[in-house]
């Protein structure tokens, strides 16, 4: 998925949607739980170094874990945190929010696009390949 590598920007909890009524009642915002295992879901903001368009450069990978995943250490002297995702899965979905049915006799106008949902079971530091020194 990330042929040139990925860089972690941050990790935060995924929060459940809260209606205006729930907010008005002062109800606390709850963290989303994974449908499969019930664990809290965390969102890892990532830069895809192989993205061809700037709109595709920043992606989110969701991880279900009991505790907040800890990003790898930054490369000394930088804020760059190379990462490898364990158990990464990609699920395609159709974003049809741009679809509008035309009025009677008009053509259907659709600006639907293909989206991807990224999930992982964990993350670990990307190991830099060492370059042998010339003698």
Image (tube, rainbow, N blue to C red):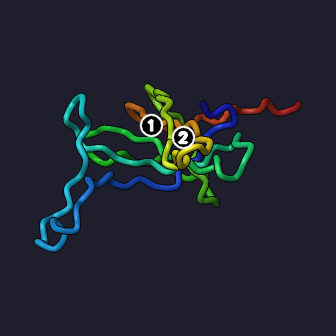
Residue toward you, 104 or 3: 104
Res 50 seen here:
yes
Res 110 seen here:
no
Residue 71 image position (x, y, % from top left): 45, 48
The image's mark for residue 27 is none
Image quarter where the N terminus lies is top right
Residue toward you, 112 or 102: 102
**CA separation, marks 2 and 1?**
7 Å
Residue 92 image position (x, y, % from top left): 50, 30
Relative to 134, 10 lies left or right: left
Which of the 4 quarters of the picture holds residue 35? top left
Residue drawn where x is 19% and y is 56% of the image: 30
Q: Is residue 100 above or below residue 64?
A: below
Q: Earlier in the sequence, mark 2 or mark 1?
A: 2
Image quarter where the C terminus lies is top right
Task: Tell me if label 2 and label 1 are in contact, CB under 8 Å.
Answer: yes
Residue drawn where x is 28% and y is 55% of the image: 15
Which of the 4 quarters of the picture holds residue 126? top right
Q: In what element is the residue under mark 1?
A: strand
The image's mark for residue 123 is 1
Residue 69 image position (x, y, % from top left): 36, 45
Q: Is residue 93 above or below residue 31?
A: above
Q: Residue furthest right?
A: 135
Q: Which residue is mark 2?
A: 83
Mark 1 neighbour class, 10 Å CA radius: few under 14, some 14 to 19, many 20 or more:
many
Residue drawn where x is 50% and y is 42% of the image: 96
Q: In what element is the residue under mark 2?
A: strand
């Amino acid at each position: 998925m990330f042929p040139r590598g990925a860089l972690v920007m941050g990790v935060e909890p995924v929060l459940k949607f809260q209606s205006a009524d729930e907010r008005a009642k002062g109800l606390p915002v709850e963290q989303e739980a994974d449908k499969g295992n019930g664990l809290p879901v965390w969102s890892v903001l990532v830069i895809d170094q192989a993205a061809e368009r700037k709109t595709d450069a920043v992606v989110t990978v969701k991880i279900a874990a009991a505790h907040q995943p800890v990003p790898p250490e930054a490369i000394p002297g930088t804020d760059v945190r190379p990462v490898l995702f364990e158990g990464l899965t990609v699920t395609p979905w159709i974003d049809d929010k741009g679809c509008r049915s035309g009025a009677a006799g008009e053509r259907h106008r659709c600006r639907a696009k293909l989206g991807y949902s990224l999930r992982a079971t964990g993350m670990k530091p990307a190991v830099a390949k060492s370059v042998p020194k010339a003698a």
